[in-house]
Amino acid sequence: MEFFWNLYQSKVWVVPFLIYAIGILLFGSVTLLAIIIWTRHTHIKEQKFILQYDRLIEPMLLNVLFDTGSYSTFNNDPHYSSLFNNTVFRKQMMANIINLHKNYEGSYAKKLEKFYLESHLITDSFRKLKNARWEIQCLAIEELSEMNVVTVFEHLVDTSKSSNKLLKIAAIKGCIKLNGTKGITHLIRHKDPLDQWSQLSIIDAIKHGDLRLTEGIEILLTSKNDTVVSLGLKIIQSLHLSQHNLDIIRMISTTDNVYLKQEGQLTLTAIKSSNT
Amino acid sequence: MTFFTAEITAMVNIYLLLILLYAILIMSSYLVLAVLSFIELKEYIKKNSFIDYEILLSSQQAPYLSLIAPAYNEGLTIEENVKSLLSLNYNNYEVIVVNDGSKDNSMDMLISTYDLIKKDLDHETPITTKAIRGIYRSKNAAFKKLTVVDKENGGKADALNVGLNIAKHPYAVCIDVDCILDKDSLLKLAKPFLESIDKKVIATGGVVRIANQCTIEDGRLIDVNVPNKLLPRIQVLEYLRAFLLGRMAWERLDGLLLISGAFGAFDREIAIKAGGYNTKTVGEDMELVVRMRRYMLERNIPYTVSYIPDPLCWTEAPDNAAIFKKQRSRWMRGTIETLWIHRKMFFNPKYKILGMISVPYWTFFEFLAPLIEFVGLLVTLIFVILGILNWKIFLLLFLFVYIFATMFSLLALLGEELTYHKYPRIKDFLKLFAAALIEPLYFHPLAVYAALIGYWEKIKGKKTWGDMTRQGFQKKQ
């Protein structure tokens, strides 16, 4: 201790310490400034590329949709063939095709699905699905389920057990997209609680899917997981599924959870008032 | 120091050592908070890219919110401000404008613009407030979300308490009526209340940004600009630092003490049980958050306070030194009052991170920092007068502090670039960069001076807010 006090009092350390500290801070500041400039530059460049590629991708996809265009046609076109191996171009093409697919059904959607398969964008999605980062997996799930790749369903059921909330929601939404409400009946065995945001996200996915596919939803009311039962009640209420009134009454009589009993009663009242 | 006795020399050395330790502690705490903020921001942005807020828009199960907007002498802008509050992207909400005994024509404006008629509405008064003169609702169905309360003047906290009493919904969103809210602000503010299972979310705050010289149209922000005037321009930088590099870190630590009075949402039941806003302090926003947290901790109820880094609320910053000094001295009085009211929490392990880190941090680095700087200046001056100042060390030290401050501002600018990128024009970036270079020499001394005035006003027992004259936003031509 005395050594340090003497060293401190001698003050021989002050000037070298300050000079080194200033040097480090100056280096830090210049580095930060360089990173800011580089970030801005990259951002601007990225925006430029997006605009440039969009000008090529949009007519190509519209040609696929409304004309006779196919992947092979464009792959033989020198304007496009080199770009098909460009990562940024493929990323942009994926985003466009997914957005477009959301707006079309039937034969038009099938054309886009065919393009997705032939252009090997599907391989990109599967590669992303195997990525260790959850956000990349979420993207892959969105892409694969949007493009109706049903083979991925079982994988999504497994992923819906993930402890990562967003990955879990993405997987459940994917299941719904591929299999309607049947895609969530596996939640009956779900152990972790689902928060309200997850529940609303699931309901929203159901609303955006095929509303005719609601069979089996009542099974959620028999789950041992109270939040899954609550989800079942919310789905029944949101879709006004009055045919499940008896299932709700059964749930109310069997559950010990006061909040669920209350929610069940409110659901029955809401369905009743919406039907009158 | 030849004419100093050994004792005095030792005392000076001890003082300098303490100041050195304090400086090291405060600077490292800033850096630690910045690192934590960056981690939290990165996670938030990543998660947010998968969030569809429209879910709340179409859902009956979206949380029900009561927007409480106290108004005092806002006649010039109240019509447009209320209109903008009524047109937010959200379904389950009501707007309660509390006219806090305005002396101008605010109430007449509201009555005529929104077809208001006096109603006898039954409501409980769990919080005692000044007398209510009347509660008004609109005859026009288009304004069915609007309730206007006319009351005797009692200050902002009292007006907010009236709003808490009148509110029908479980969550109260307290805002400054003259703030510009992002269209999706309520969607974003409501989401955290739905996300927690094992902890109750008692409050959510959003980032406030500076709107001086930004273009506003129909109560909406349509073009973001960096102000030309130096004082508001530096405040843009200051707010970026405070919100992006400070509060996000406190959110991560679950030790947030302050949700800006300009825009924050609270669990109404807990806010009322905790006693509502304290009318005896000018820092009612911070005091309420601390009291609500204390209420939960003392009852061992698991809870959390959430924070959203999205720029949801835009406000006008003081653009001249006189108003700036009034604002900052009031902030300092508010800090002193809150810390004093809750002094029991200081280094009290019963209050967990709040007692052991947040409250001591605010005490040492928010409340005491200006005083320590002032004492440092005086000591330096004495050293100069006595001719014992080592100018070489002084200049190196000055350079060290200056470069640290600039680097920290650059860190905030980087945070902004990597996240919201609200200032894409090169001109705006250069203005902010220049502000970062000027700030330690101009703005910081002014802020310290204002804080010292705050100490002095507190000693004198000043309790009022002081006038905050605003210039008004720039409208689109």
Image (cartoon, coloured by chain):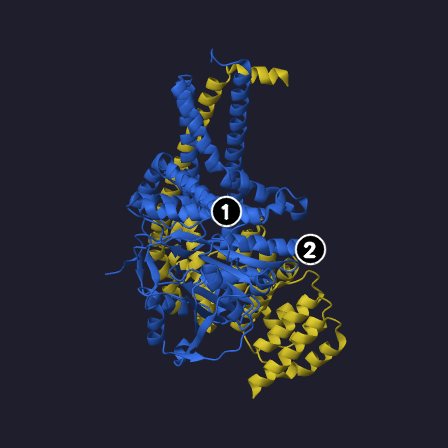
Q: Quadrant of the C terminus of chain A?
A: bottom right
Number of marks in picture:
2
Residue A9 placement: quadrant: top right
- Residue, disc 1: B335
- Residue, disc 2: B300
Give the SS element for disc 1. Answer: helix
Q: Amino acid at mark 2?
A: Asn
Give the distance between the C-alpha atoms of the residues marked 1 and 2, in whole angstroms.
26 Å
N-terminal label among 1 and 2: 2
Same-chain status of marks 1 and 2: yes
> Given the image, what chain letter belongs to the residue carrying mark 1?
B
Mark 1 Cα-neighbour bin, 10 Å: few <14, some 14–19, many ≥20:
many
**Left/right of residue A166 with respect to residue A52 in the rendered view:** right
Residue B284 in sight in this render:
yes
Q: Which chain is yellow?
A: A
Residue A163 in sight in this render:
no
Q: Residue at 39%, 23% (x, y): give it.
A: B395
The answer to whether marks 1 and 2 mark residues whose Cβ atoms lie closer than 8 Å is no
**Left/right of residue B79 with respect to residue A4 in the rendered view:** left
Residue B432 x, y percent position in the rendering: 34, 42
Give the SS element for disc 2. Answer: loop
Residue A29 placement: quadrant: top left
From the image, state the color of chain B: blue
> Given the image, what chain letter belongs to the residue carrying mark 2?
B
- Give the vertical position of B102 relative to B430 (above or below): below
